[in-house]
Amino acid sequence: MVDPLEREADDAPRRRFLLEETGFDEVPPKYRRFYRRWQGASDRLGPNEAICPVCKVVIRSTRELREGDRVYCMPCMSRLVLVRAGDGALEARVAY
Amino acid sequence: MADFLSMYSIQHWLASCPQGYLAGTEFGHAPHEREPGLVLEDPLLREQAIGTTVQLVVGERCALAASSGLVNAAPDEASKCFLATQTLDEARHVEVFSQRLQDLGVKRSELEDTIRQFANPNLVRFAEVLLEKVDRKDFVAGVVGQNIVLEGMAFSVFEMMHAGMQDVNPKFAHTLSGTIADERRHVGFGENRIGSLIAQHPEKKPEIERMQKEMSYWMLATFADSFRNSPAREEMRKLRANLSGYGSAPAKWQGADLTALEPAEMERLLADTVLKEFKVRLGRIGIEYQTPAQP
């Protein structure tokens, strides 16, 4: 059963985010703002961010990410799907 | 699938790599950057730097031979193109690390003798296991060995070295950051391409698992030699304390302060990190990780 509070949150409009350059230069310029370097275990991800499990780059979206969303990691060219992990956090899984 | 494979294009590589993070660099670093004076002046530090760099050259020569050898074994054009870009990446790595040997004072005429003198025999055995698969044109085993095992190891080793060098040797740290960016593409190709191919060739799994176990053993033996035979540890530590910037910030990697670790602790941290990564990466593509024997 889905927690009603959670369902309500999922039905709510997604928050929007303005992305700024972070100095990430491993993809062509027009895509750079969609990625940033991960700073290690103490790096807290925003609601619009997911970490690529393959290359450890943080993927950033202009909108809040939710379970089932598909994201693309251009630095390592992996296609990812967001799933809800055991601890309730969103986790990116590779789609082969 | 067509869209996925189209990312493995020369154009994508050009825009990301030579026109991206390598723009304006010379041998992987900013043109004005130099090796720290102390590394060049102190015989012990210089010899250690040469010894470490030789292992990088040996590893990259293996990667160059493997990626170029796999081009003709690839089952599709997109994979051939990707491996062609990887071949150039690996050739660049061989060049930048060989150039570092020359920056450290090794004469060009002495390069091969220096590599022979310092090359770790366990690392050579590691390379031989992989190159045997490549010589047999075994694409699936070759890519797992090259892009998941070898590149997975390189990814962690370079990250650890980068964390340790960032404050004390910006030139070498800059060179390493470019190679780490290259490794992201390589491990991504390994997982994504093999992740889809391994399902079509389940009969390959036992052989690949044996290869991973054997390569992992030689990797651990290489780490053991590198850390356990570290010369004059205390003297090295004193010398490092004199390097510009040392002590201003701890060299953090995987939650540990590298400057505070003993060689045995550093060896354990690196080995655990790499083996854990192997297990996770192989598990994702349906290959069961095999625990290697302890050297």
Image (cartoon, rainbow, N blue to C red):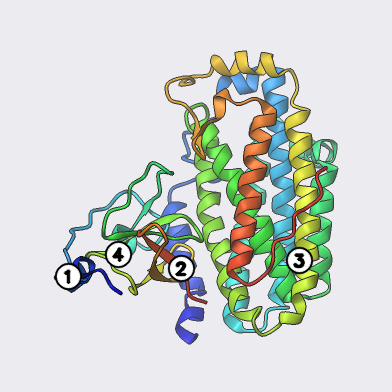
- Residue that carries the numbered disc 4 in the rendered image: A30
- Residue that carries the numbered disc 1 in the rendered image: A8
Q: Is residue B142 left or right of residue B100?
A: right
Which numbered disc, 1 or 4, marks the residue closer to the eye? 1
**Which residue: 69% across, 44% down?**
B56
Residue B26 appears in the rendering: no
Relative to the observer, which residue lies in front, B134 or B72? B134
What is the CA distance from the residue labelled 4 to the residue labelled 3? 40 Å
Subunit bearing disc 3: B
Residue A37 pos. (x, y %): 39, 50
Q: In which quarter of the image is the C terminus of chain B?
A: top right
What is the CA distance from the residue labelled 2 to the residue labelled 3? 23 Å
Amino acid carrying mark 1 in the image: Glu
Residue B31 appears in the rendering: yes
Mark on residue B209?
Answer: 3
Q: Considering only vertical position in the picture, is B113 above or below B84?
A: above
Q: Do labels 1 and 3 share a chain?
A: no
Which numbered disc, 4 or 3, marks the residue closer to the eye? 3
Amino acid carrying mark 2 in the image: Arg
Quarter of image, res A69: bottom left
What is the CA distance from the residue labelled 2 to the residue labelled 4? 25 Å
Mark on residue A93?
Answer: 2
Subunit bearing disc 1: A
Residue B259 pos. (x, y %): 55, 25
